[in-house]
Image: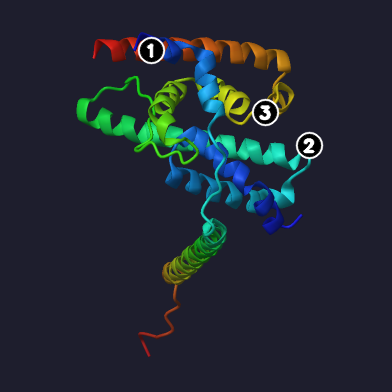
């Protein structure tokens, strides 16, 4: 028992045990899974590009709408400032 | 070299390296996939400042260490939420020790050694794994870790001492229990 404990504390023996670990081969389907992951990642990035494009389009449309609305309002405001000539002759 | 050729040449190397870090088949498979996704994304920009093998080794090491950090932070935030403690000395342990390269009769002993390796700092852990588990030469390891051979020697010396201390602590704790 003591010898077993002593061997555990011996770093060189620990390294020997680690050196005995065999190399293993991964699952054969791992390549397909990797390709799938690459494909999914590309799909996701395309989806994000589409979402970003949609958001930009909505932003520009709302900006155009707001500006045009403001312009109309401004036109009305400007027209109020222009003095209208009254051509009615009261003593006619 | 096409992606398929790179995969068939290096997938075993990446998988085995990930196993040494994580000691779990599922995690090692996930790391292998993530490493080759990165290789696929970055292979056009690979500038051949180092060999392809060294480059893939570095990606695999970083990916494995990030995976370990991810697990640690998950654990930490969960515990921090419950106990509102910020600084908890946490070490990563695999959910299940499932290293297919370890023989049955060596399983308990190797599990104990890996538990001690998992407590080492990242650089020390990598030095032990590359030199003692992957059987890389000092020159190769220094190149992978992007450091001078002398610096690697002193890093390995510190790692070995710390590992020895941790193993002794584990043994003493085992005797008491």
Q: On the image, which quarter does residue A35 sit in?
A: bottom right
Give the image location of residue B148, x and y in percent.
72, 18
Observer-nearest of B21 and A11: A11
Residue bearing mark 2:
B49
Q: Secondary structure at mark 3?
A: loop
Left or right of B58? Residue B2 is right
Mark 2 near mark 1, Cβ–Cβ under 8 Å? no
Give the image location of residue A88, x and y in percent.
40, 85
Observer-nearest of A18 and A51: A18
Q: CA distance from mark 3 to mark 1?
A: 29 Å
* In this rendering, the label closer to the viewer, 2 or 3: 3
Q: Quadrant location of the N terminus of chain B?
A: bottom right
Instruction: Give the tally of numbered discs.
Output: 3
**Residue neighbourhood size for the residue with mark 2, other residues' Cα within 10 Å, grouped as few (<14), some (14–19), many (≥20):** few
Q: CA distance from mark 2 to mark 1?
A: 47 Å
**Residue neighbourhood size for the residue with mark 1, other residues' Cα within 10 Å, grouped as few (<14), some (14–19), many (≥20):** some
Residue at position x 64%, y 35% in the image = B58
Left or right of A74? Residue B78 is left
Residue bearing mark 1:
A5
Residue at position x 38%, y 25% in the image = B91
| Circles 2 and 3 on the same chain | yes
Q: Secondary structure at mark 1?
A: helix
Against A19, is B32 above or below?
below
Left or right of B87? Residue B35 is right
Give the image location of residue B72, x and y in percent.
38, 31
**Residue neighbourhood size for the residue with mark 3, other residues' Cα within 10 Å, grouped as few (<14), some (14–19), many (≥20):** some
Q: Which mark is residue B136?
A: 3
Q: CA distance from mark 2 to mark 3?
A: 20 Å
Q: On the image, which quarter does residue B174 sit in?
A: top left
Give the image location of residue A28, x and y in percent.
54, 58
Q: Chain of mark 1?
A: A
| Circles 2 and 1 on the same chain | no
């Amino acid at each position: 028992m003591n010898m077993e404990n002593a061997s555990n504390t011996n770093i060189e023996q620990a390294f020997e045990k680690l050196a005995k670990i065999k190399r293993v081969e991964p699952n054969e389907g791992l390549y397909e899974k990797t390709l799938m992951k690459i494909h999914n990642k590309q799909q996701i990035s395309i989806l994000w590009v589409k979402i970003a494009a949609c958001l930009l389009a909505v932003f520009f449309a709302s900006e155009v709408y707001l500006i045009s609305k403001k312009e109309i309002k401004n036109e009305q405001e400007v027209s109020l400032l222009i003095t209208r000539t009254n051509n009615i002759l009261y003593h006619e | 070299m096409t992606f398929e050729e790179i995969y068939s040449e290096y997938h075993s190397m990446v998988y085995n390296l990930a196993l040494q870090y994580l000691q779990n088949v599922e995690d090692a498979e996930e790391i292998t996939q993530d490493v080759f996704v990165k290789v696929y994304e970055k292979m056009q920009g690979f500038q051949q400042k180092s060999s392809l093998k060294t480059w893939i080794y570095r990606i695999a090491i970083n990916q494995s260490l990030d995976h370990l950090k991810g697990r640690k932070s998950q654990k930490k935030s969960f515990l921090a939420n419950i106990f509102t403690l910020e600084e908890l000395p946490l070490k990563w342990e695999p959910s299940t020790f499932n290293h297919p390269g370890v023989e049955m009769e060596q399983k308990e002993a190797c599990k104990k050694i890996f538990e001690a390796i998992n407590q080492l700092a990242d650089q020390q852990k990598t030095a032990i794994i590359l030199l003692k588990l992957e059987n890389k030469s000092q020159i190769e390891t220094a190149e992978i870790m992007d450091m001078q051979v002398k610096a690697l020697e002193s890093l390995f010396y510190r790692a070995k001492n710390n590992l020895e201390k941790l193993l002794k602590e584990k043994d003493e704790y085992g005797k008491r229990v």
